[in-house]
Image (cartoon, helix red, strand yellow):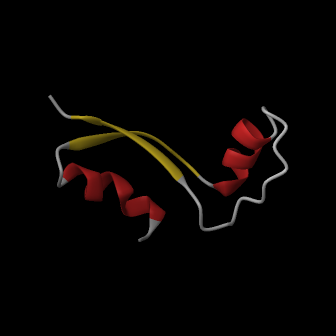
Amino acid sequence: MDPTDIGDYLSKYSLSLIEDIGSEEVQERYMKLVNLDLKVFEIERIALAEVKR
């Protein structure tokens, strides 16, 4: 899936995209924050969504 399409994809399931971050940001925000020496692959992403009201 193209990351730019995630909002449209979630919309089909009555979800609204709040945040979508890629591997570099995951590494900076989460792995370094808790001092984890884990490799995050380039294809990994984290998306946060909420149910539409």
Q: Position of residue 48 (x, y in %)?
A: 43, 40
Residue at the spot 37% in from the left edge and 62% down from the top edge: 5
User: Which of the 4 image quadrants contains residue 35?
Assistant: top right
Horizontal placement of 41 versus 19: left or right?
Answer: right
Compared with residue 34, is residue 36 higher up or lower down, i.e. above or below?
A: below
Horizontal placement of 51 versus 26: left or right?
Answer: left
Total marks drawn? 0
Residue at the spot 33% in from the left edge and 51% down from the top edge: 7
Q: Residue furthest top?
A: 53
Q: Position of residue 51 (x, y in %)?
A: 23, 35
Q: Residue furthest bottom?
A: 1
Residue at the spot 78% in from the left edge and 32% down from the top edge: 33
Q: Position of residue 39 (x, y in %)?
A: 77, 59
Frontmost residue, 18 versus 27: 27
Q: Position of residue 19 (x, y in %)?
A: 47, 39
Horizontal placement of 9 versus 18: left or right?
Answer: left
Compared with residue 32, is residue 8 higher up or lower down, i.e. above or below?
A: below
Frontmost residue, 44 versus 18: 44
Residue at the spot 22% in from the left edge and 50% down from the top edge: 11
The N terminus sits in image quarter: bottom left
The C terminus sits in image quarter: top left
